[in-house]
Image (cartoon, coloured by chain):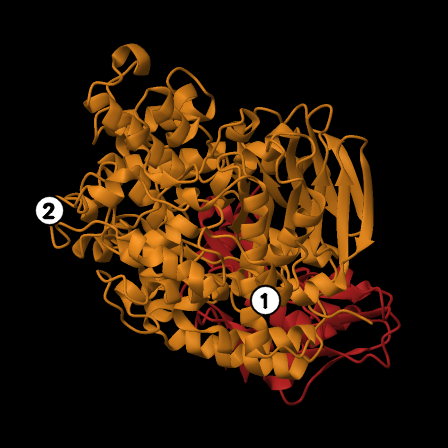
Chain colours: A orange, B red
């Protein structure tokens, strides 16, 4: 049977012996796990032993698109990178937008599975059926931007879309990203370092084929209805296009949820300086959309003249006058978390993160932990080479560069907050879960986010169940952020629904404006699979349980579903949320119960049988 | 008479127009077959959709040896008559703007025909960067561009 939505082919590349092979997609898995994050996880579950070291050549990296990637479905731009993450040792599913995922679909592949390890630096060139492993010795050490330009030039393909790693990935920085379209990142959990360990510098793709749909008429109707809904919604139709994701900065700060100076406080006095409003007024040139995106939250901001000492001078041709970002999370991590309120320094640090292939969330959070160690006297100038005080823009920009190249104290920062704080005997200063640093919401002030962080399958991650939406923004209904009541239910629901969105190949920002019931007709019409709404929720649950099971086999237990001591025991010192701690113990047992897991958080054989997951 | 009025400042580079156009052309989502192309100028932070101008002095039409390009009475668009087209590709070469294409599957030329008066790209654009509106309204960004082009021309003829 012909497949629709999916292209029905996967590309398998063995980097060790340089062979490439197109294979048929496992159709049953495609229907059960939808695509993207789901199918990718299923392949990883089948093919990779969870107990291996992430840098072992037996680890594989899977680039996966969903059935809606490359269609005109709003925000159908996403691809997922699935592998065993270096920073977390869990299964990792890092998502990125831009144009790379659709281009892979146009080349005729749903997934690319990369195996083994190349003997010397290489990059992969995919042009429809033509797949070639090319030498990348001349690209090794180059920045992301330079790599993209050089590959396009040497291939003579101005339309090729490139996903690459920067020096951070080559130097195995624990939180290195895979970057595409220069400023889009599959950011967290250290996927870039896994790619670097395989000596793979980049994957360049050009595709000229089409994505076919099962029921075009129905699809277009669903697409138009969804698009209209997005346009009319205040968040996706006005807030995000006008101020970008950084619209959250003032909102989150106002309600005392903005973690400041390594989570010592929950309000930042300099928040306005790094907010979306300020960015729009002082820096914004234009909005930029990912492929097929009808929201266009991306910011293209001015730098160069006027940016003073933080002007970008490293790469004159690219983005001479402009850079993308910072988004809310980087602005928080590089700004509020390190106490820096100098907008130009934050923009510069964010630019350098993109250029060198670093995850700015982990970067900022790790630096914040180092700053707290410095201010409490654990480390001094002898180790750091410069004062690492909270609020020092100087330290921020210098350390970002040093980290990517592992120079001086950057070599310590490159290990991430968990390993760095443990090395200096201050593990309690690591603010994160399972090796991954927290993103920009204080879980003491928003109870549901605490459960989200604790139970996420790739460590502290806000994207796997964004309960900020109901708890603070009132989407789809307003919940009290300070109670734990019913939060387990919401977190589970959001985890399952988000899994479906991720698996479909669309952006989860859609969930601000629409629900699963709006995505469902699109998905059904594109794939021709008679999904019911329940089937989709079940698919989401299946993906979640599969990832959980994989982590369990990798050695993770309920003991890892926890939060740092500061979050559980040290109350927020001031502001509207003064006195709050996260009461995870009130939510976790209920969450396990709702999931149908045992009391120690293990999926039961019955649950696995019900979902059709092989144990 | 209506025409496609493109306002680059509003474009976000989302490719919805390319998707819609390729949909009309092929029934699949295949931007490589789109007749409207979004040019992305990263260094200038600028995006611009770009398609056939339906120019008055249509070189594609005048160059066609079989008179296969005609003017639609309803929209004024220059349209390829597939029955007459022999697929020689002269029109694609003649077009100074690169907006006439050759389809290797059908061996015919194809170009923007304004979707018979209901252009899919304009409908699909989420930011209003492509409008299908009455002509006669001068695009404000055109003036400096025209000055620049004319200046180049004057520079050339004055040596």
Q: Position of residue A455 (x, y in %)?
A: 42, 51
Q: Position of residue B36 (x, y in %)?
A: 62, 66
Task: Using the numbered discs, state the Cα–Cα distance from disc 2 to disc 1 in whole angstroms.
Answer: 43 Å
Mark number for residue A539?
A: 1
Q: Position of residue A473 (x, y in %)?
A: 28, 66
Rendered residue at 38%/66% (across/down): A490
Q: Is residue B39 above or below residue B110?
A: above
Q: Secondary structure at mark 1?
A: helix
Q: Residues within 10 Å of mark 2 (few under 14, many from 20)?
A: some
Q: Quadrant of the N terminus of chain A?
A: bottom right
Looking at the image, residue A138 sits to the left or right of residue B80; the answer is: left
Residue matched to label 2 = A574
Q: Residues within 10 Å of mark 1 (few under 14, many from 20)?
A: many
Q: Is residue A294 above or below residue A190?
A: below
Chain assignment, label 2:
A
Say whether disc 2 or disc 1 marks the residue closer to the N-terminus: 1
Rendered residue at 55%/36% (across/down): A192
Looking at the image, residue B6 sits to the left or right of residue A257; the answer is: right
């Amino acid at each position: 049977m012909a497949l629709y939505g999916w292209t029905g082919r996967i590309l398998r590349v063995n980097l060790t012996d340089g062979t490439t092979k197109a294979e048929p997609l496992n159709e049953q898995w495609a229907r059960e796990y939808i695509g993207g994050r789901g199918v990718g996880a299923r392949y990883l579950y089948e093919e990779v032993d969870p107990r291996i070291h992430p840098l072992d050549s037996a680890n594989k990296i899977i680039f996966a698109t969903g059935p809606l990637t490359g269609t005109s479905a709003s925000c159908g731009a996403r691809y997922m990178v699935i592998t065993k993450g270096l920073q977390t040792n869990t299964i990792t599913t890092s998502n990125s937008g831009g144009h790379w995922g659709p281009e892979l679909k146009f080349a005729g592949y749903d997934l690319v599975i990369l195996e083994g390890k190349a003997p010397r630096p290489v990059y992969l060139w995919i042009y429809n059926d033509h797949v070639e492993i090319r030498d990348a010795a001349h690209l090794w050490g180059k920045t992301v931007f330079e790599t993209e330009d050089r590959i396009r030039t040497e291939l003579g393909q101005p339309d090729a879309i490139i996903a690459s790693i920067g020096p951070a990935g080559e130097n195995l920085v624990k939180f290195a990203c895979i970057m595409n379209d220069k400023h889009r990142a599959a950011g967290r959990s250290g996927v870039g370092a896994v790619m670097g360990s395989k000596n793979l510098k980049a994957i360049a793709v050009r595709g000229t084929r089409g994505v076919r749909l099962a029921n075009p008429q129905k699809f277009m109707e669903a697409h138009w209805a969804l698009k209209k809904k997005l346009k009319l919604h205040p968040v996706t139709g006005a807030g995000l296009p006008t101020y970008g994701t950084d619209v959250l900065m003032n909102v989150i700060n106002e309600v005392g949820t903005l973690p400041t100076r390594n989570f010592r406080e929950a309000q930042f006095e300099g928040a306005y300086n790094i907010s979306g409003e300020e960015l729009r007024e002082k820096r914004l040139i234009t909005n930029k959309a990912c492929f097929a995106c009808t929201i266009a939250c991306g910011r293209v901001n001015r730098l160069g003249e006027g940016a003073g000492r933080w002007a970008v001078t490293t790469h004159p041709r690219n983005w001479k006058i402009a850079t993308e970002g910072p988004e809310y999370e980087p602005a928080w991590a590089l700004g509020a978390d390190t106490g820096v309120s100098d907008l130009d320094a934050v923009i510069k640090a964010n630019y350098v993160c993109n250029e060198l292939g670093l995850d700015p969330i982990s970067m900022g959070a790790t630096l914040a932990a180092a700053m707290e160690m410095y201010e409490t006297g654990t480390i001094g100038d002898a180790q750091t080479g410069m004062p690492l005080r909270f609020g020092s823009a100087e330290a921020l920009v210098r350390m970002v560069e040093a980290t990517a190249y592992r120079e001086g104290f950057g070599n310590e920062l490159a290990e991430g907050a968990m390993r760095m704080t443990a090395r200096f005997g201050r593990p309690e200063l690591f603010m994160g879960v399972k090796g991954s640093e927290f993103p920009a919401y204080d879980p003491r002030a928003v109870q549901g986010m605490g459960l989200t962080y604790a139970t996420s399958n790739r460590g502290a991650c806000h994207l796997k169940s964004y309960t900020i939406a109901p708890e603070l923004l009132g989407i789809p209904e307003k919940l009290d952020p300070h109670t734990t009541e019913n939060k387990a239910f919401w977190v589970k629901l959001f985890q399952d629904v988000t899994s479906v969105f991720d698996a479909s190949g669309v952006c989860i920002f859609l969930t601000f404006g629409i629900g699963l019931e709006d995505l469902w007709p699109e998905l059904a019409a594109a794939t021709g699979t008679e999904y019911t709404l329940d089937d989709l929720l079940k698919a989401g649950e299946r993906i979640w349980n599969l990832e959980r099971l994989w982590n369990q086999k990798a050695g993770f237990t309920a003991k890892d579903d926890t939060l740092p001591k500061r979050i559980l025991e040290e109350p927020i010192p001031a502001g509207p949320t003064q006195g709050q701690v996260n009461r995870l113990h009130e939510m976790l047992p209920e969450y396990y119960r709702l999931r149908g897991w045992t009391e120690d958080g293990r999926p039961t054989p019955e649950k696995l049988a019900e979902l059709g997951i092989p144990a | 008479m209506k025409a496609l009025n493109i306002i680059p400042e509003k474009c976000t580079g989302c490719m919805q127009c390319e998707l819609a156009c390729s949909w009309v052309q092929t029934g699949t989502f295949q931007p490589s077959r789109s007749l409207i192309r979004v040019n992305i100028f990263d260094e200038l932070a600028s995006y611009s959709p770009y398609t056939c101008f339906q120019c008055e002095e249509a070189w594609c039409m005048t160059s066609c040896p079989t008179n296969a390009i005609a003017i639609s009475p309803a929209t004024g668009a220059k349209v390829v008559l597939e029955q007459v087209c022999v697929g020689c590709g002269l029109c694609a070469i003649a077009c100074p703007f690169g907006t006439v294409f050759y389809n290797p599957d059908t061996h015919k030329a194809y170009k923007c025909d304004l979707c018979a008066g209901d252009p899919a790209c304009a409908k699909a654009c989420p930011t209003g960067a492509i409008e299908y509106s009455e002509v006669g309204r001068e695009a404000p960004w055109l003036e400096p561009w025209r000055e620049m082009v004319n200046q180049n021309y004057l520079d050339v003829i004055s040596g």
